[in-house]
Image (tube, grey):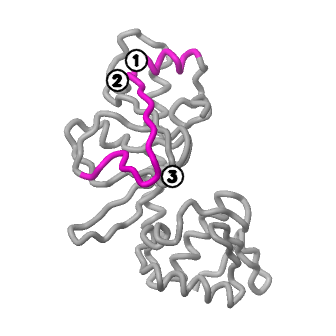
Amino acid sequence: MDLANTQLFRGLEKSEITTLLDCLNAAERNFRKGETILSEGSITENMGIVLSGMAVISSSDIWGNTSILGNAAPGSVFAEVYACIPGQPLLVTVSAAEDTSVLFLNAGSILATCTNACPFHTRLVRNLLTVCAHKSLQLSQRILHTSSKSIRGRLMSYFSECAKRTGSSSFLIPYNRQQLADYLNVDRSAMCNELSKMQKDGVIEYERNRILLKEQKGLDPLTKPPVP
């Protein structure tokens, strides 16, 4: 992973990033599939950048029901909000969806004045603010996807976002069936049945994690997918 291509370090030279990593007490850790990276209720001073693999952010209630709140692909940052609030327990769990490598950075060192007086430290702070703003937008998108009362409506809302983001009516989703059901806050079996119905109705085609939105009555699925 080239850190210069990540949102957090965007606009910085590799030599500047190397200097910053020393300031931020950077430490790389590897996690096996299914392993917990950060647990709910814990306190962290470090935010993480996924270098490889995939991290899933989830929340569970006292009855053990789990909701998927999002995922962190390579280059994505997680736990930045908690790391910036000293003593704030995590309300979520971050786990490895596959074998995952994470670079941890001390958030306090980002917010504090750099002892080395790095002229590019201000750029890093601006980038962190942008990351936080994007996370807020992602949470708003999930609220939008789960606003429909029907499973089909929730699926099509999410698929519409994926199509717009990738610029294609054919795309890969980052979740398995259980994770997708948790993200959309629906029953897995009911969701799988609805996916089968949608394929039978000619609304979509799918194979594992690849989804293809089909044209309906002359409408371009990329610009206006049908949402019942």
Q: Residue furthest right?
A: 218
| Residue 50 location (% of width, % of height) | 50, 41
Amino acid type shown at disc 1: Cys
Verify CB contact (< 8 Å) between mark 1 and mark 3: no
Name the residue located 67 percent from the left edge and 67 percent from the top edge: 210
Q: CA distance from mark 1 to mark 2?
A: 7 Å
Query: Which one is in front in this view, the residue at disc 1 or the one at disc 3?
Result: 3
Ranked by sequence position, the earlier of labels 3 and 2 is 3
Verify CB contact (< 8 Å) between mark 1 and mark 2: yes
Task: Find disc 2 in the rendering and name its residue.
Answer: 109
Q: Secondary structure at mark 2?
A: helix
| Residue 71 location (% of width, % of height) | 48, 54
Task: Find disc 1 in the rendering and name its residue.
Answer: 23
- Asked whether 138 falls inside the magenta stretch, the response is no
Q: 10 Å neighbourhood of mark 1: few (<14), some, or many (≥20)?
A: some
Say whether residue 145 is left or right of residue 210.
Answer: left
Q: Secondary structure at mark 1?
A: helix
Which residues lie in the magenta part? 15-40
Name the residue located 22 percent from the left edge and 50 percent from the top edge: 41
Say whether residue 65 is left or right of residue 97.
Answer: left
Name the residue located 69 percent from the left edge and 79 percent from the top edge: 204
Ranked by sequence position, the earlier of labels 1 and 2 is 1
Amino acid type shown at disc 3: Glu
Q: Residue furthest top?
A: 116
The quadrant of the picture occupied by the N terminus is top right
Task: Find disc 3 in the rendering and name its residue.
Answer: 98
Name the residue located 45 percent from the left edge and 65 percent from the top edge: 142
Say whether residue 205 is left or right of residue 192.
Answer: right
Amino acid type shown at disc 2: Ser
Q: 10 Å neighbourhood of mark 3: few (<14), some, or many (≥20)?
A: some
